[in-house]
Amino acid sequence: MGGFICTLIGVICKACVDFLTKSFGGGNAEFTSTLFTGIAIVLTVIGVLVTLKRAEDQKGKLTALGIHAAIWIVGYFLLGILIPLVIGAVVLCVVLTFLGLNPLGTLLNLFSGTASQDDDEDLFQVQKPEEKTVEEKVEVWRMTETGRREDLRVNSSGDMYYDPDDEDWHKIK
């Protein structure tokens, strides 16, 4: 089994690098492609040798070589299709996240069963800011001997006022 995994890792390396170097290019694209082709070949040779060592007869060895070839042919073809789809899905998720939607969170909630299936609400809900309660400012005043209004200081909680005559705080009635 370990030999097949080595071959699969080699195919994944080769397919990913080929897609990226052909799509995006760059100055070192040819060197990078050649380097990873070499790595893929070395991994495949290691995988084949490990598999052939464990095979007991000629039929088992031929079957193992056929599986390695199938991994290369089918794997490289399928990865050529899957890699652009995965990259497109990642880009789509990033764009939707920046727009305020959370597609991954919604999908995970759906798969975990925490989202109710009976709700007709939208999957994406915009959060509204909480409304702040406006407290009334309490004013305490008294009339002076001359008939003018004198405002008195009120504490921050609005339940006591300061009387400058006796220099003490009193509860507001």
Image (tube, rainbow, N blue to C red):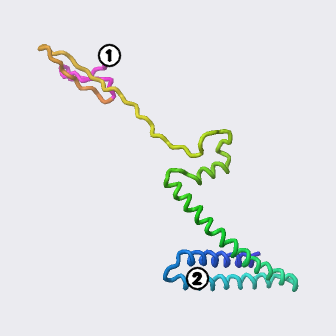
- Is residue 111 left or right of 171 when viewed as pictured? right
Against 151, residue 128 (above or below) is below
- What residue is drawn where x is 34% and y is 26%? 136
- Is residue 58 left or right of 74 when viewed as pictured? right
Q: Is residue 83 magenta?
A: no
For label 2, the SS is helix
Against 49, residue 135 (above or below) is above
- Is residue 97 left or right of 61 when viewed as pictured? left
Q: Quadrant of residue 4?
A: bottom right
Checking the image for residue 55, the label placed there is none
Checking the image for residue 33, the label placed there is 2
- Kind of residue at badge 1: Lys
> How packed is label 2: few (under 14 Cα within 10 Å), some, or many (20 or more)?
many
Q: Is residue 158 magenta?
A: yes
Please give the range of residues in magenta: 157-173
Observer-nearest of 155 and 34: 34
Observer-nearest of 76 and 36: 76
> How packed is label 1: few (under 14 Cα within 10 Å), some, or many (20 or more)?
few
The quarter in which the N terminus is drawn is bottom right
For label 1, the SS is loop
- Kind of residue at badge 2: Ser
The residue to which callout 1 is attached is 173
Q: Are marks 1 and 2 in contact (CB under 8 Å)?
A: no
C-alpha gap between disc 1 and disc 2: 85 Å
The quarter in which the C terminus is drawn is top left
Q: Position of residue 29 (x, y in %)?
A: 53, 82
In this view, the mark in front (1 or 2): 2
Q: Position of residue 55 (x, y in %)?
A: 83, 82
Against 154, residue 74 (above or below) is below
